[in-house]
Amino acid sequence: MIEQPRIVKICDILEESANVRTLFFKRILDFMPGQFVMVWIPLLDEKPFTISYMQKDIAGISVLKRGIFTQALHAKKIGDSIGIRGPYGKGFHTQTKLNACVVGGGIGMASLATLVDALSDITIIQGARTSSEIIYKTRFPEMKLCTDDGSFGFKGTTVDFLRELLNTRTFHKVYTCGPEKMMYQVVELCKNRGIDCEASLDRYMKCGFGVCGQCDCSGQRVCIEGPVFTATELSRMEDFGRIHILKTGERITI
Amino acid sequence: MSSIDLSVHLCNIRLSNPTILASGILGTTRALLKRVAESGAGAVTTKSISNEPREGHKNPTVITFDGGMLNAVGYSNPGVDAAAREFSNLQVINVPVIASVIGTQKEDFARVVDGLSDTNFSAIEIPLSCPHTPGFGLLAGQGTPEATFAITSEIRKITKLPIFVKLSPNIPEICTVAKAAEDAGADAITAVNSMGPGMIINIEAQKPILHFKVGGVTGDALRPIAIRCVYDLYKAVNIPIIGVGGVSTGRHSIEMMMAGASAVGIGTGVYYRGIDVFKKVCEEMVQWMEENNFDNINSIIGIAHD
């Protein structure tokens, strides 16, 4: 496969929250929930995004506005173009008939959304800092919502909510994506309760296909061996929940 | 199990096989170098280390095409102090580790080599040949015989480790540059760096894809040029040559050694065949040697010469 971006036109835009919007484009992608694409704005930059909607020939990426690149994506209008390459990486392992739970924190919910679409018996937990940052509220009306400030739903973290929930019921599998400290706690909680768990990691990426070494996490290339890892794999990755690598390659404690 | 032994000696460093992870691919962390060693490489090279931290070019930095790969990563690295921490305790890696060292001035190279003096690197490689990073390599005039001599001499003064000088395939007088490196005390020549720079334009966007617009060409497109450079260098210098450029199979590796390489770098091969390309190349070399009645890898070095 030749790893170069292909240009797609934005065909629709959906406001998901105060600072998240979804850009839709026409493109048939051989995509598994949890995989990602590299999104290119010519002359500006290129960054990884999960596909958050996948319907026949229409795909969508949900973009949180937080830096120059995501601001530029937010400035795109219907009819504007972006470059897409991928999908890349390993997605979530799914068993459609078994009951499962997804735990999303912030924009991490985007990488769980197509997984929710694919599963039939699913409990959805989303955590946000405040009510205006909750996404997919009408898309997943049955979603259990947690806010740090208590402005909507459960006041507290998704980890607190999941812990309480597990006192009364269990799941065959828990999938999580969000801030790494949150995912670390979800994975630990599931291990303690004997529940199978998978987490999708976020690292600064360059090539996306396993040659540059930028997205290393304890010898695993997040772009190719990940971004989804099983709890067993994560337990061998010392950097999970602790260390990120900056653009320069320097390790920092998270 | 085959009786064929692939081990080679490179400047008194024993390699269990001739494959070396080339600089710039996967060499960002100790953990990844360890994994590459466990994937069969005979030696591994770090991503290039400069005195100061560098973020490198913006993305896209690495793309591919039907003839190989085009990259302009721009020497992102955490700087020598953080690199010395990252690459401490190299004993956990069971093959020799080569430090790739870059600088804008010869004193700069020396500071980096000095900053790594408490680590356990087996050799220092200096790429004086990068075609796509302002301030370094070709864009800083480091590829001339004079600059190559000056930089190599400066490093020779402060380290006893073997010095490998990595050369550009772009320069017609590559043998003159190699001799300047040899005269300055280099212990081996690494040939070659990426060629070019080249450019790939996305015709729908009507713009070059790489953020830096141009980048070094590696992979299949580079191999015949790398083979020719190694062939010419083998006649021109008396120090060993590490052949790099488009090697991703056992046949390529044999070809490179027949041209005169004592060891073979693999970089873009990781893209073609995965992280275990080293093991695959070695297995294919053994198979070829069995089929063609060679039992000693050293006997094929330079065999293509008259």
Image (spheres, coloured by chain):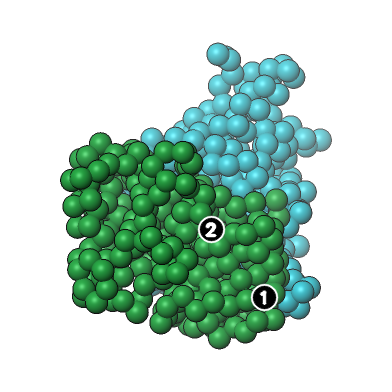
Chain colours: A green, B cyan
Frontmost residue, A137 versus A229: A137
Rendered view: B245 above or below B249? below
From the top left corner, tell me how far across and down residue B184 is, in percent: 53, 59
Q: Which chain's residue wears label 1?
A: A
Residue farthest along the right direction in this orientation: B306
Please tell me which residue is depicted at 62% across the width and 80% down the height of the picture. Answer: A43
Q: Where the C terminus of chain A falls, by quadrant?
A: bottom left
State the SS at label 1.
strand
Left or right: A189 with respect to B123? Answer: left
For the residues labelled 2 and 1, the Cα–Cα distance comes to: 20 Å
Query: Could you say which disc has been placed on residue A36 in the image?
Result: 2
Residue A243 visible in rendering: no
First of labels 2, 1 by sequence position: 1
Q: Which chain's residue wears label 2?
A: A
Name the amino acid, label 1.
Cys
Residue A170 visible in rendering: yes
What is the crowding at mark 2: few (fewer than 14 residues within 10 Å), some, or many (at least 20)?
many
Frontmost residue, A60 versus A42: A60
Left or right: B119 with respect to A205? Answer: left
Rendered view: A25 above or below A241? below
State the SS at label 2.
strand
Please tell me which residue is depicted at 54% across the width and 77% down the height of the picture. Answer: A14
Query: Could you say which disc has been placed on residue A11 in the image?
Result: 1
Please tell me which residue is depicted at 36% across the width and 61% down the height of the picture. Answer: A143
